[in-house]
């Protein structure tokens, strides 16, 4: 079937995409590796010199680094947990015979389309403002002391905000999957008198194994790289993650070498997660 | 067959679902409502939900002060431009991989996906310096190139999953009837591929519109899209919530409408066809 002509044409058609992606992946990365080995400050660019692993040692021993790693992992972990647990709950709720389901669906998916800078400012100023924010108002009604979120609990504030952005995505995926559950299987379970718990653990959850993997994989890619929410709310000092730290070191402190070392560490971190996840998704996708 | 569901249970579930939906939607609703208030009312406690003097003044003030239209047109140019280029690269690639899969096609696709795993901070410093040296900082061309590259893997994957569903038999039948490759493309493949291409385009315009890492770091004013426009509202403190809300509403409204249309494609697009 496949003639030589067709094969050549096929290669010709894929080549441009492969080429630009390869360049995009390899050139900046190679430069970052090179910069990370230099003592290179933008304010003193003429006197850049080779410094070996100094930047890495400096970066890793900097207390800001361990905080950034901790904040990165905490944020990813929290948002993933919220997305999966509440996402499944919401998907099961929306799968019920409810009136106006398509409208509720639209309401729930909306935050996903809100740009990060908007949600950052809306949450910081209008939801979580310690005096006039909606949450402070609700706290007062309940007789609780309002929280100054971004001053006293910036990590939780960022986690709540980012969860709000990513829960809709998870919900939509789980809902799509739950709706593809065999109707006959559902009825059979009901006729056999399966308890709701048995139904959930033996039928729904196994069916959701693949979408759960997919949600974890895709959200992790994006969550490792959360930046705008931290940058715009000005909570980088306490809740800064790896992307923020690299930005801070490079574009605010002009320390190109140090920032590049941080960038490489972030790449390694992401790759560890990626290998782990690709293996996981590979397994579920095969079956 | 439809089962009889007790009315009570149905009512209860409906109320619960609507409550959850409204809770999640609330910040957006609140933003839109606040954009029609005066600054004084935006701050009033208890907050006013619907009963206030509706005004449009915030919108005109925002446009006057910060030139919303320039940022909005940049957003359109960047998101549509980068998506069109990605389609120009992605359509031939996805077409070849879907219809002439080789031994390495699967590996190639996985590799493309893996480029998405690369954190942008790994490339930030050289890209920033390179853009500075080449005079590309704060230019539309530079940003379009970056947005094109970060979305290309998603474009190829999405198109691939759509093209995969086009029955090969039809192509073969056309070939049997003596259709040339060109005719095969225009009259047989194109009509079946258009819906997939359209949804790919829609989803990628949305992703590019909301991209905030590169746009914040590589642009300041001339080429800056709405993400940067909104970020400029983070500095002034004080009575500005109504204006912030008006600006936010204008920044998210166009994409929200597109998003509501695209939501069914969202799942398969962003899960690389793994969940349909």
Image: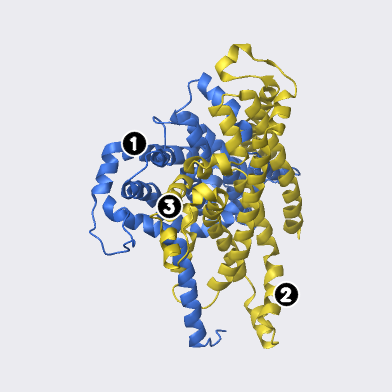
Question: From the viewer's perspective, is residue A206 above or below residue A97?
Answer: above
Expressed as whole percent of the image width and height from the top left, the position of residue A43 reads 55, 17
**Around disc 2, counting alpha carbons within 10 Å, would you say few (fewer than 14), some (14 to 19), or many (20 or more)?**
few
Chain for colour yellow: A
Expressed as whole percent of the image width and height from the top left, the position of residue B204 reads 51, 46
Which chain's residue wears label 2?
Answer: A
Q: Distance between the residues labelled 3 and 2?
A: 44 Å
Q: Earlier in the sequence, mark 3 or mark 2?
A: 3
Q: How far apart are marks 3 and 1 (CA)?
A: 30 Å
Residue at disc 2, secondary structure: helix
Question: As drawn, is A67 to the left or to the right of A100?
Answer: right
Chain B colour as displayed? blue
Mark 2 highlights which residue? A202
Q: Residue at x 72, y 54 (%)?
A: A281
Expressed as whole percent of the image width and height from the top left, the position of residue B205 reads 47, 45
Q: Which of the 4 quarters of the picture holds residue A187?
A: bottom right
Q: Which residue is drawn at 59% across and 46% down?
A: B154
Residue at disc 1, secondary structure: helix
Mark 3 highlights which residue? A129
Residue at disc 3, secondary structure: loop
Question: As drawn, is B233 to the left or to the right of A66?
Answer: left
> Which residue appears farthest toward the top when viewing the image?
A46
Question: As drawn, is B263 to the left or to the right of B232?
Answer: right
Mark 1 highlights which residue? B70
Compare residues B185 and A211 and report the one nearer the observer. A211
Which chain's residue wears label 3?
Answer: A
Whether residue B35 appears in this view of the structure is yes
């Amino acid at each position: 079937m496949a003639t030589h002509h067709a094969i050549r044409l096929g290669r010709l058609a894929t080549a441009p995409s492969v080429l630009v992606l390869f360049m995009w992946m390899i050139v900046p990365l190679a430069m970052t590796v090179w910069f990370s080995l230099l003592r290179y400050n933008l304010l003193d660019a003429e006197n850049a010199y080779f410094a070996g692993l100094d930047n890495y040692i400096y970066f890793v021993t900097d207390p800001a680094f361990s905080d950034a790693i901790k904040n990165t992992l905490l944020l990813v972990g929290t948002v993933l947990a919220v997305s999966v647990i509440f996402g499944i709950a919401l998907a099961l709720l929306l799968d019920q015979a409810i009136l106006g389901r398509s409208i509720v669906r639209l309401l729930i998916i909306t935050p996903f389309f809100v740009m990060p800078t908007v949600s950052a400012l809306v949450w910081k100023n209008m939801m979580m403002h310690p005096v006039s924010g909606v949450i402070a108002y609700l706290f007062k009604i309940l007789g609780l002391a309002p929280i100054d979120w971004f001053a006293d609990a910036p990590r939780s504030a960022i986690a709540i905000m980012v969860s709000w952005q990513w829960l809709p995505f998870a919900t939509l995926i789980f809902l799509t999957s739950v709706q593809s559950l065999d109707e006959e299987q559902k009825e059979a379970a009901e006729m056999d008198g399966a308890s709701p718990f048995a139904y959930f653990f033996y039928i729904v959850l196994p069916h959701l194994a693949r979408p759960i993997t997919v949600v974890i994989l895709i959200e992790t890619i994006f969550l490792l790289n959360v930046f705008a929410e931290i940058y715009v709310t000005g909570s980088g000092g306490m809740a800064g993650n790896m992307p923020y730290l690299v930005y801070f070191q490079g574009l605010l402190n002009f320390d190109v070498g140090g920032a590049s070392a941080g960038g490489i560490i972030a790449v390694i971190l992401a790759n560890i997660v990626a290998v782990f996840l690709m293996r996981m998704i590979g397994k579920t996708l095969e079956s | 067959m439809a089962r009889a569901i007790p009315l009570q249970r149905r009512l209860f579930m409906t109320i619960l679902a609507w409550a959850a939906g409204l809770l999640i939607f609330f910040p957006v609703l609140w933003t839109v409502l606040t954009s029609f208030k005066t600054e004084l009312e935006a701050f009033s406690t208890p907050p006013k939900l619907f009963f206030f003097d509706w005004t449009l003044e915030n919108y005109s003030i925002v446009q006057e002060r910060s030139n919303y239209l320039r940022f909005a047109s940049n957003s359109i140019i960047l998101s549509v431009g980068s998506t069109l280029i990605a389609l120009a690269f992605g359509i031939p690639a996805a077409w070849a991989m879907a219809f002439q899969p080789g031994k390495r096609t699967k590996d190639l696709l996985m590799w493309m996906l893996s480029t998405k795993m690369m954190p942008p901070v790994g490339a930030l410093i050289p890209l920033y310096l390179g853009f500075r040296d080449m005079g590309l900082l704060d230019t539309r061309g530079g940003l379009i190139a970056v947005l094109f590259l970060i979305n290309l893997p998603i474009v190829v994957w999405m198109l691939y999953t759509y093209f995969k569903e086009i029955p090969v038999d039809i192509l073969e039948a056309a070939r049997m009837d003596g259709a040339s490759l060109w005719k095969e493309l225009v009259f047989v493949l194109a009509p079946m591929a258009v819906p997939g291409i359209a949804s790919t385009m829609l989803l990628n315009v949305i992703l590019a519109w909301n991209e905030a890492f590169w746009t914040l770091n590589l642009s300041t004013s001339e080429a800056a899209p709405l993400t940067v426009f909104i970020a400029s509202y983070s500095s002034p403190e004080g009575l500005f919530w109504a204006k912030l809300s008006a600006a936010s509403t204008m920044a998210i409204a166009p994409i929200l409408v597109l998003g509501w249309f695209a939501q069914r494609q969202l799942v398969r697009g962003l899960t690389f066809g793994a969940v349909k």
